[in-house]
Amino acid sequence: MKVILASQSPRRKELLGWLIPEFEIQPATIDETPFEGEKPKQYVQRMAVEKAAIVKQKSAVDTLIIASDTIVTIGNEIMGKPTDQKAAKAMLKKLSGITHDVYTAVVLVKNQQEEKLLAHAAVTFYDLTDEEIETYLTTSNYTDKAGAYGIQSFAGAFVKEINGDYYSIVGFPVGAVKQALKKFM
């Protein structure tokens, strides 16, 4: 069976590789603007569904499409990817010393069969100094990351506590995806 990962994320590629030895990468470009009043869980699930739909339109029948999206939230505020270093700094200052939520939605679709997953983790950061934030920003690890951080890099040192699926923070809940794949194999 042909499998397509609708993402260019190196982390998602690596984690899916743990489960499936061969697959193609076809990122989906979509408008990631939240709808007025859209709640974080609805938003992240809609993003994954839209990515899967775009790739499915261009794919052969019997192709399994796997699409995913990850967001960081404080309450109902969706913290997307920072547009620049200034925005990244503001996000990290906001996350400093508090617990925030990370949601990763995954959609698996083949023909008319569809499985939707939503993984969650509550992440608590230590209080961050301006110096710690500035040092982190010099690494450029904040680029293309929801909430301006990737837990699998230097920002892992910011984490005081995690409650939930670690891999949802990385961007691909590998255990939940493995279980869902059983329904397609």
Image (tube, rainbow, N blue to C red):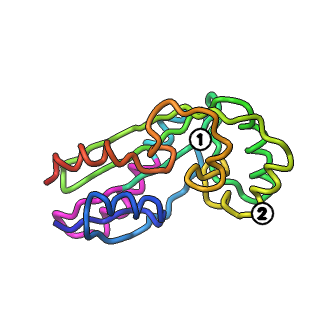
Residue for point 26% across, 70% down: 22
Which residues are drawn in magenta? 47-66
Residue positioned 41% across, 57% down in the render: 51
Q: Judge whether residue 166 is colored magenta.
A: no
Count of picture labels: 2
135 over 41 or under it: above or below: below
From mark 1 to mark 2, how far is it between C-alphas?
Answer: 21 Å
In the picture of the structure, the residue carrying the numbered disc 1 is 72
Residue 57 lies in the magenta-colored region: yes
Q: Which residue was labeled with disc 2?
A: 138
Find residue 34 and report its image quarter: top right
Q: Are marks 1 and 2 in contact (CB under 8 Å)?
A: no
The secondary structure type at the circle numbered 2 is loop
Q: Earlier in the sequence, mark 1 or mark 2?
A: 1
In depth, the one of 78 and 181 nearer the eye is 181
User: Residue at left 64%, top 34%?
Assistant: 160
User: Residue 47: x and y, percent?
Assistant: 46, 49
